[in-house]
């Protein structure tokens, strides 16, 4: 996180309109310190893994 001025993660959960379960929306907003810093794409796999772990716990 030393490469970013700010980094905000927002998680929104909405019940499905039909059937059981919910839909989860993750939003990652960040401001890099400079243009040479790569986008935090490695976090996408992390977010996906967390979502799957939570799903296992809730079902």
Image (cartoon, rainbow, N blue to C red):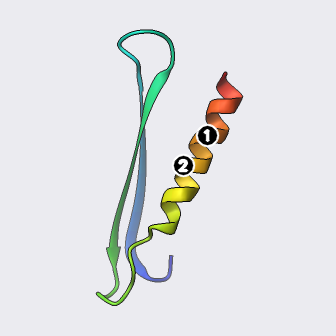
Q: Residues within 10 Å of mark 1 (few under 14, many from 20)?
A: few
Q: Are marks 1 and 2 in contact (CB under 8 Å)?
A: yes
Residue 37, placed above or below residue 52: below
The tag on residue 41 is none
- Pinpoint residue 25: horizontal percent, then vertical percent: 39, 40
Callout 2: SS = helix
Callout 1: SS = helix
* Residue drawn at point x = 63 percent, y = 36 percent: 54
Residue 36, placed above or below residue 6: below
- Pinpoint residue 51: horizontal percent, then vertical percent: 57, 41
* Residue drawn at point x = 44 percent, y = 70 percent: 40
Q: Closer to the camera, 21 or 34?
A: 21
The tag on residue 48 is 2
Q: Which residue is mark 1?
A: 52
Q: Quadrant of residue 45?
A: bottom right
Q: CA distance from mark 1 to mark 2?
A: 6 Å
State how many labels appear.
Answer: 2
Q: Quadrant of residue 37?
A: bottom left
Residue 27, placed above or below residue 22: below
Q: Closer to the camera, 28 or 41?
A: 41
- Give the position of the C terminus as an image quadrant: top right
* Residue drawn at point x = 45 percent, y = 9 percent: 19
Q: Residues within 10 Å of mark 2 (few under 14, many from 20)?
A: few
* Residue drawn at point x = 50 percent, y = 76 percent: 1
């Amino acid at each position: 996180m030393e490469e970013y001025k700010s980094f905000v993660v927002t998680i929104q959960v909405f019940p499905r309109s039909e059937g059981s379960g919910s839909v989860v929306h993750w939003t990652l907003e960040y401001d890099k310190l400079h243009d040479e810093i790569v986008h935090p794409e490695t976090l996408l796999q992390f977010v996906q893994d967390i979502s799957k772990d939570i799903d296992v716990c809730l079902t």
